[in-house]
Amino acid sequence: MKSRNALTAALTGLAPAVWGSTYLVTTELLPPDRPLLATTMRALPGGLFLLALGRKLPAGIWWWRALVLGVLNIGAFNFLLFVAAYRLPGGIAAMIMSAQPMFVVILAALFLGDRIRAVHALACLMGTGGVVLLVFKGTASLDAVGVLAAVGGALCMASGITLTKRWGRPEGVNLLTFTGWQLTAGGLVLLPFWLSLEDLPDSLTGSNVIGFAYLISLGAVLSYIVWFRGIERLPAVAVSFLALGSPVVATLLGYLVKDQTLSVLQIVGMVVILLAVVLGQPRPPRPKPGAAPSAPPRATGSHLPDHPALEQEHSG
């Protein structure tokens, strides 16, 4: 069970790793100053492709559930993320967004019945502290709209993780189709903002096409499939800590590709973030004191003891 959880966590962590490369792809390969175009193109084409592949639309209550999840996980989250990034310099947006696991800890306790554990509180502090060491550079003025956007983005992501875990997936709907519902809903919500706030590019270069193809395939379709699979199989709190890998990858890519410097404090920050992610992952239940690992004694009568504890899931 422990190795299976570790493998699932590692696979799920690939999604934030890919998202950490989005900034580099956007700045190097896409048309400049069009973040809403990038976000809409990242979500909508991939969502429509998965819908065409699955040939199944939501039914009943899942019409509004798919809309809510698409807005929280993709549409509103990405829109608020770009607003915060444009209005908050010096990595402050990433610092505020690092509070997202703390929000999930609270929401999971309220809506999923998970216990708030001391180790999760410690991991939240370590995660935020690691991001501060990683991205903060000196003092910077705080823009109220940017701060609200960053907090709103963190709440959107935390709420999306929690509700995806709580609602699960409708019976008979595969993961690809479920992902397509959310990508399409999120892309449709972003579409009017893009058309009203940004101009269309005059032309597309070969680099632009490569960048959009990367965002649609790896940055949306594959990464969100892996992400939602992880939410199904891991505790919500464990998934939330994996998202802290995104700024780590963004920093490493800046160092490797754009010749940016990497300070000792940033390296320490990466290590602290990694430790926070590890602390946030589920652990196998501890054996009760005095419990013998041997097989239970053979029953001598018709009465067989029940073991309801064996049926309980360990939430981590």
Image: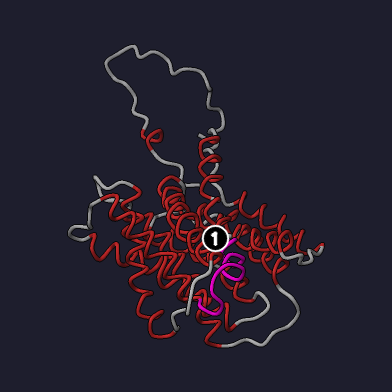
Position of residue 209 measured from the top left corner of the image (x, y, whole percent): 50, 64
- How are the residues colored? secondary structure
Instruction: Please indicate whether residue 183 sits to the left or right of residue 158 in the image.
Output: left
- Magenta highlight on residue 33: yes
In the image as oriented, which residue stretches furthest toward the right? Answer: 264
- What residue is at 54 percent from the left and 74 percent from the top? 31
Nearest the eye: 223 or 197: 197
Position of residue 35 measured from the top left corner of the image (x, y, whole percent): 50, 75
283 versus 181 height, above or below: above
307 versus 65 height, above or below: above
Quadrant assignment, res 180: bottom left
Q: Amino acid at mark 1?
A: Trp
Q: Which residue position holds label 1? A: 19
Residues drawn in magenta: 19-34
What secondary structure prevails in the magenta region?
Answer: helix
Q: Residues within 10 Å of mark 1 (few under 14, many from 20)?
A: many
Nearest the eye: 185 or 209: 209
Instruction: Please indicate whether residue 86 sits to the left or right of residue 235 in the image.
Output: right
- What residue is at 56 percent from the left and 28 percent from the top? 290
- Magenta highlight on residue 204: no
Residue 241 is at least partly visible in this image: no
Nearest the eye: 39 or 16: 39
